[in-house]
Image (cartoon, helix red, strand yellow):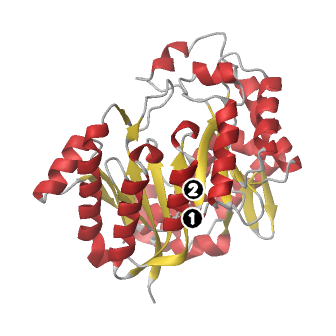
Amino acid sequence: MKKRIGVYVHVPFCSGKCAYCDFYSLAGRDKQMPAYEEAVIRHIREYSPQLDGCLIDTVYFGGGTPTALGADRLIAIFDALKKYGNVLVDSEVTLEANPESCGRQELIRLRKAGFNRISIGMQSGNDRLLETLGRRHNFARVEEAVVDAREAGFKNVSLDLIYGLPAQSRDDWAGTLAKAAALKPDHMSCYGLKLEKGTPMYILRDSPFLPDDDTQADMYLYAVEALARYGFRQYEISNFARRGMESVHNLKYWRCEEYIGLGPAAHSYMNSRRYSNIADLDEYIGRMTSGGSVIDQMEIITEQEKASEYIMLGMRTTMGIADEEYRRLDPMGMEEIARLLEEFNSHGWAARENGRWRLTPEGFLLSNTLIGELLEAQARQRMLWKRRTDPVDDMQMRMTGMAQEPVPVFKGM
């Protein structure tokens, strides 16, 4: 039986670099688009022996701004994928787009070619804040882009939003959510602003105009509450969807399912190997042209690491984790982990439903710390398991004074 995988295509081109963006994207490199297209298609041909044994049920064109590449090149890449891979007829095929770069006629062509989901970078409903972010659209253009996408035949439309912006108030954020919901999208992603070193907005990292942590937390919890009222169900820390409209491709990441990445800086996870492509457009094109490898880094994921990733990624979702699923990766089960989750539950940070543990919205706010604590509990459990199953090792530990019974310690916030 053929396994199902996803395909991610990284399109690094942009009409301009946003002030907060630290993704691998390039402005003013349009002349390299033909060479990029050829390189990605050659990459697909190279992958064809692996693709032959798989069914592709999700394809995601991300960036960068994929629509900056133009409909002709996007369709050519997707056609090559259909030619050399087994793309299912009902695959979810997502296209990221900025409002100013997705004209109706091009969207009509893309929809006819098989693209069926579009993710539009709205970011804010406030034109002043959009200008601060270095965006090249206003809210009126977002409205037009959604109408264009619907009239082109897209029945699955997502909007990306950012909160915690300079001088952004809770009321302003509430207004953005209301404006976004009024456009009747099927999916929304809400991300807190992170100022990364090397971006123009990094100079604002200590600015009093940035909302503080408590205000950002309040904005997040308000989004969870408001979007539920608007008919969106939270299914991951930052993602909300109408029933049945979750991003199938992104769920692959959180469920530790397999995918391949095409283009510079793209990542793959196949056959217990995780690897990334070089994050350099010129080098990527050059190596694909000369027949060289474009892999930058690779690591083999052990069964132990898979169990850790199951916790780390699963606890990002509202589905959470379950002992039965965990035991498929690690036979010792979740005894120590569940003990800590009970502690989280007493603080209102975790909940257990139908045999599954998940974080609450309040827990999601602390997810980095809480998941780190769970991974430490997992390490303690492995040490206990090793002592129970290896008496020689246990004796050696006792002789060196290392065998004191580990007591789960909750560090708190």
Mark 2 is on which residue type? Leu
Residue positioned most to the right: 229
Secondary element at image label 1 = loop
Q: Please report the residue visible at 60 percent of the width from the left and 64 percent of the height from the top.
A: 248
Residue toward you, 150 or 128: 150
Q: Quadrant of residue 291?
A: bottom left
Q: Is residue 5 visible?
A: yes
Residues tagged 1 and 2 counted as in contact (Cβ below 8 A): yes
Q: Is residue 311 visible?
A: no
- Left-right relation of 12 to 379: left
Q: Which residue is mark 1?
A: 255
- Left-right relation of 233 to 55: right
| Inter-mark Cα distance, 1 to 2 | 7 Å
- Left-right relation of 17 to 39: right
Q: Position of residue 376 (x, y in %)?
A: 56, 50
Q: Which residue is mark 2?
A: 313
Residue toward you, 179 or 197: 179
Viewport quadrant of the C terminus = top right
- Give whichever of discs 1 and 2 has the lower sequence position: 1
Q: Position of residue 280 (x, y in %)?
A: 26, 41
Residue positioned most to the bottom: 1
Q: Position of residue 166 (x, y in %)?
A: 65, 18
Residue toward you, 24 or 348: 24
Q: Please report the residue visible at 51 percent of the width from the left and 27 percent of the height from the top.
A: 20
Q: Please report the residue visible at 43 percent of the width from the left and 37 percent of the height from the top.
A: 23
Q: Position of residue 240 (x, y in %)?
A: 72, 51
Q: Please report the residue visible at 44 percent of the width from the left and 23 percent of the height from the top.
A: 199
Residue toward you, 368 or 281: 281
Mark 1 is on which residue type? Arg
Secondary element at image label 2 = helix
